[in-house]
Amino acid sequence: MVECSGNAGAMAQTLEVARNAGRVVFIGINFREDIPVALGKFQVKGITAIGSNGSPGVWERCIQFLSRTKLDLRPLMTHTFPLTEAVEAFEFTREPKNRAIKVILTNE
């Protein structure tokens, strides 16, 4: 499982939804707040967590660039699933035949 948002709630929730003996990669960056998590989930579920070495400030510069250039990234968003179908969405992305580039989960 990969957590890319950096949202405190999403980062904490990742341990809840990770499968037993699963791996979690934290790509999202959050230096602004402490994120309470139940560390016992690592032992009980046998979770392995990995943190990526991100670039603080890169998202703000990226958003400014996109705003300035009006670059349309919608073609990268190839598929959309409701949040209630997150498991199906992850399974969908694993199949190369689906040619998923950016799968969006919506809360609708």
Image (cartoon, grey):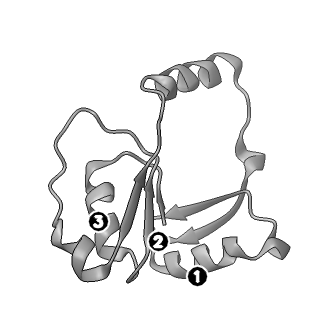
Give the residue pinned by disc 2.
83
Image position of 48 with respect to 101: above or below: below
Q: Residue at x 68, y 77 (%)?
A: 92
User: In the rendered view, does 72 fall on the left or right side of 2?
Assistant: right
Give the position of the C terminus as an image quadrant.
Answer: bottom left
Amino acid tagged 2: Leu
User: In the rendered view, does 95 fall on the left or right side of 87?
Assistant: right
Give the residue pinned by disc 3.
13
Give the residue pinned by disc 1.
88
Going from the N terminus, do you reach mark 2 or mark 3 first? 3
Amino acid tagged 1: Glu
Q: Nearer the viewer, residue 74 or 23?
A: 23
Is mark 2 in CB contact (under 8 Å) with mark 3?
Answer: no
- The location of residue 53, given as percent across then percent down, is 47, 37
- The location of residue 81, given as percent across then percent down, is 58, 71
Name the disc covering residue 10, or none.
none
Secondary structure under the numbered disc 2 in the rendered image? helix
Give the total of numbered labels: 3
Going from the N terminus, do you reach mark 1 or mark 3 first? 3
Image position of 78 with respect to 73: above or below: below
Distance from the alpha carbon under mark 1 to that under mark 2: 10 Å
Q: Nearer the viewer, residue 49 or 32?
A: 49
Quarter of the image for residue 63 reads top right
- The location of residue 11, given as percent across then percent down, is 32, 56
Q: Residue at x 47, y 44 (%)?
A: 52
User: In the rendered view, does 75 fall on the left or right side of 59?
Assistant: right
Q: Residue at x 62, y 19 (%)?
A: 65
Secondary structure under the numbered disc 3 in the rendered image? helix
Is mark 1 in CB contact (under 8 Å) with mark 3?
Answer: no
Distance from the alpha carbon under mark 1 to that under mark 3: 18 Å
Secondary structure under the numbered disc 1 in the rendered image? helix
Amino acid tagged 3: Gln
